[in-house]
Image: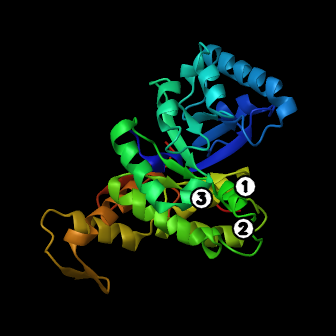
Amino acid sequence: MQSALSLGATLYMPATRHDLWQVVKGEKYPELRSLVVCLEDAVAEHDLDYAKQNLKTLLLRLKNEDRRQPYPMLFVRPRHLNMAKELAQWSDISLIDGMVLPKFGLENLLYWQQAIPSCLQVMPTLESAETFDMATIRELRQALQTDFRPVLTLRIGGNDLLNCLALRRPYDLTIYQTLLGQLISNLCGQFLPYGFALSAPVFEHFSQMKLFQEELYLDIQYGLSGKTIIHPAQIPFVHQAYQVNEIELKQAQQVLDQDAQAVFSLQGSMMEPATHRRWAERILERAKFFGLKYSPQTSRIMGLEISHNEHSVMNLP
């Protein structure tokens, strides 16, 4: 199972878009690492037939034409379980990397397990009312551990969860300042200690870049891996937010050094490998995928080689 951090900013696009191939091929947004072609909320009922035909055309092009290297991972979000079963019968569906599973929960977990081809990765979405019930979420996590295939990441459906409360995200608040802040904290407590990854909710006010950056900082502090986005201008902000600074990198390397003392001081902080090991491993993983904040070029810093040729990161405008 690959790292959820490799997804970076995950762009959602309606299956009706005429430029799907240019994005999937890696030409239109060369810094993009993952995208979801959506057949659910982003497509009106009367456009559904066209959307599915457009997706079929995309798969045919994937089969017959070369894609740019590296190209973004491609996921499809079906409208519901029955549509997922329909898509699973398509001869070329194995050309995508995986599926996003909408309205995922205890009551449909086994049905999703049976519907999705084993060759595809899955990203279940936590977005229904039962997500607020931590007893149910605990049962769901236990079921995922015992009765379900490996999960790339669990996506937090912020807008759907706010809709359960008859609310919408305000223009001037991060998601953590809304009623979902405590919920996200609870989900982190239920899933992160058990090896699951969580992906941060969409930030729909794409003109509010300062607030977006504040939310990205909090996404990282909560331990979330990547973020759902709905506008390409958000891509470089996500990738730069996940870069690490030189101090973090040095601290992480010292913590993971096999000769590290049980407790030591570094740059004004106490370092304790017994309790900081998982944090340090996470820092090195972020550095691997996103690089260092101060350098956009391939760097060799303190023994760690970081290449930006494999995953290019755009500079902020």
Instruction: Indicate the quadrant where residue 250 lies.
Output: bottom left
* Residue 218, above or below 17: below
Image position of 287 (left or right of 21): left
How dense is the environment of label 1, judged by Cα within 10 Å: few (below 14), some, or many (20 and up)?
some
Residue 167: % across, % down = 75, 66
Q: Identify the residue at horizontal 75%, vertical 33% (top origin).
A: 15
* In contact (CB < 8 Å): disc 2 and disc 1: yes
Q: Is residue 294 in sight in this rendering?
A: no
Label 2: which residue? 209
Instruction: Indicate the quadrant where residue 45 lies.
Output: top right
Q: Residue type at mark 3?
A: Val
Residue 51: % across, % down = 78, 28
Label 1: which residue? 233
Earlier in the chain: of badge 2 and badge 3, it is 2
* Residue 152, above or below 169: above
Q: Secondary structure at mark 1?
A: helix
Label 3: which residue? 238
Q: Which of 73 and 85 lies nearest the eye of the viewer?
A: 85
* Residue 145, above or below 251: above
Q: Identify the residue at horizontal 34%, vertical 60% (top origin).
A: 193
Residue 130: % across, % down = 56, 54
